[in-house]
Image (cartoon, rainbow, N blue to C red):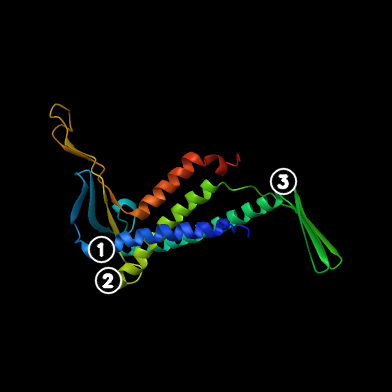
Amino acid sequence: MGTVRMSRGTWMAVLVSALVIIDQIIKVVVKTNMSIGESVNVFGDWFQICYVENEGMAFGMKFGGVAGKYFLTVFRLVIAGALIWWMSRLVKEDRTARLAGGGAVSHSAGDGTMSHSAEGGTVSGLAGGGAVSHSVKSRRVPAGVMVGLSMVLAGAIGNIIDCLFYGPIWNEAPFMLGKVVDMFYFPIIDTTFPEWLPVIGGHPFKFFTAIFNFADSCVTCGALYLIFFQYSFFAGKK
């Protein structure tokens, strides 16, 4: 028996689902076992689980009250939908390029025939006495691009779930007005500037003060990975 290979579209869906499930498990555990503002040290003082809720922007940022919250939720839904559409196009493009394999793929059905050549080739068809021919350009999509986009999509979906459903589920807010649960806190540097420094001397300094969640991490890591390691694909260099 041959080995059954999972299609790229399928494993991307599995990856996105797994990341969203992890994100939601962490949030539900924190929300049901901690009070807002409560923190637990994980590794000393520099890594803490600190339960806070925000209006929906990444890393605890706020945006425009109730109207801004509705706008932000709708904007997230539009972006997630556009990303899903784009990723499906990339999967189809990658499949076309792999089928062609640098050569030609032919297919016949009924009384018509079709031949297909990717990477600058042509598609031609003959059916019902008519002929159609048009050029098609397809290219392989690196697995890293698929992974990076899947991470970004998973992060977006994770926070969208909070906004849409957490309010009604916990009787805290109407549909679409739920708050996003954040918990990861890394105050790596917590010190005071020396007195002899002008202007800032004697003032406290803390880095990193943002509190974020697993979904935020997926978006940030996925986006940075795409920028630094998959830029050539988006620039059309491969």
| Callout 1 secondary element | helix
Asked whether residue 193 appears in the rendered view, the answer is: yes
Give the CA distance from mark 1 to mark 3. Answer: 53 Å
Which residue lies under the disc numbered 1? Answer: 31
Residue 170 relative to residue 89: left or right: left
Image spot of residue 217 (x, y percent): 36, 50
Which label's residue is closer to the chain start, 1 or 2? 1
Which residue lies under the disc numbered 2? Answer: 170
Please state which of the two labelled residues, at mark 2 or mark 3, is closer to the viewer: 3
Please state which of the two labelled residues, at mark 1 or mark 2, is closer to the viewer: 1
Image spot of residue 28 (x, y percent): 29, 64
Which amino acid does the dot numbered 3 rest on? Answer: Gly
Label 3 neighbourhood size at 10 Å, few (<14), some (14-19), many (20+)? Answer: some
**Nearest the eye: 214 or 161:** 214
Quarter-of-image position of residue 10: bottom right
Q: Is residue 130 above or below residue 43?
A: below
Residue 160 relative to residue 9: left or right: left
Which label's residue is closer to the chain start, 2 or 3? 3
Which amino acid does the dot numbered 2 rest on? Answer: Trp
Which label's residue is closer to the chain start, 1 or 3? 1
Give the CA distance from mark 2 to mark 3. Answer: 55 Å
As drawn, the residue found furthest toward the front would be: 1
Which amino acid does the dot numbered 1 rest on? Answer: Lys
Give the CA distance from mark 1 to mark 2. Answer: 10 Å
Asked whether residue 79 appears in the rendered view, the answer is: no
Tell me the residue at 69%/49% (across/down): 137
Tell me the residue at 55%/39% (across/down): 232
User: Where the N terminus falls, by quadrant?
Assistant: bottom right
**Mark 1 and mark 2 residues within 8 Å of each other at the beta carbon:** yes
Label 2 neighbourhood size at 10 Å, few (<14), some (14-19), many (20+)? Answer: few
Residue 18 relative to residue 47: left or right: right
